[in-house]
Amino acid sequence: MIGLQIIGVVAAAITLGGFASQLIRAYKIKSAGDVSYFLMIFVSIGMFMWIIYGAIMHDLIVAGANVIGVGLNVGLIFLKNRYGRLANKPA
């Protein structure tokens, strides 16, 4: 069982690393225009469903990783809204 948990932790770290890097990039360049709202919304819905699954199955790795993932997605949506409004403001 420990081997499966290690695979789960590594998979979660890789997946969350991808989202974190996108969030960091958007913050640094002050733009998230290259990220689709549909992607973020559908991924968030999927992650929320994984949270429910993880809770039902008592799988802390699945539930915890997806809680963090939803948080990263919410942060990315926030930055997309914030920087989108800034780009549309008249100078």
Image: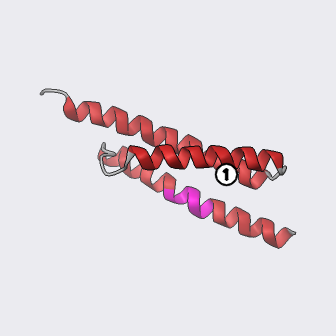
73 w.r.t. 14: above or below: above
Q: Residue at x 48, y 39 (%)?
A: 75
Question: Residue 88: where, in percent of width, then height?
Answer: 20, 32
Residue 80: image location, x then y, percent: 36, 39
Which residue is depicted at the point 72% across and 54% down?
62
Front residue (pair 9, 28): 9
Type of the residue with mark 1: Ala
The location of residue 66, given as percent across then percent down, is 65, 49
Q: Is the magenta stretch mostly helix, strand or loop?
A: helix
Q: Hey, which residue is sitting farthest top in the picture?
A: 90
Q: Which of 51 and 85 is in front in this view?
A: 51
The stretch drawn in magenta includes residue 16: yes
Q: In this view, does 2 lie to the left or right of 80?
A: right
Where is the C terminus found, in terms of image quarters? top left
Q: Which residue lies furthest to the right in this view?
A: 1
Does residue 27 sit above or below 16 in this rendering?
above
- To which residue does mark 1 refer? 65
Residue sitting at x 38%, y 44% = 27
- Tell me: 26 left or right of 71: left
Rendered location of residue 89, percent (x, y): 19, 27
- In magenta, the rendered stretch is 13-18
Instruction: Give the camera-side residue of 20 and 45.
Output: 45
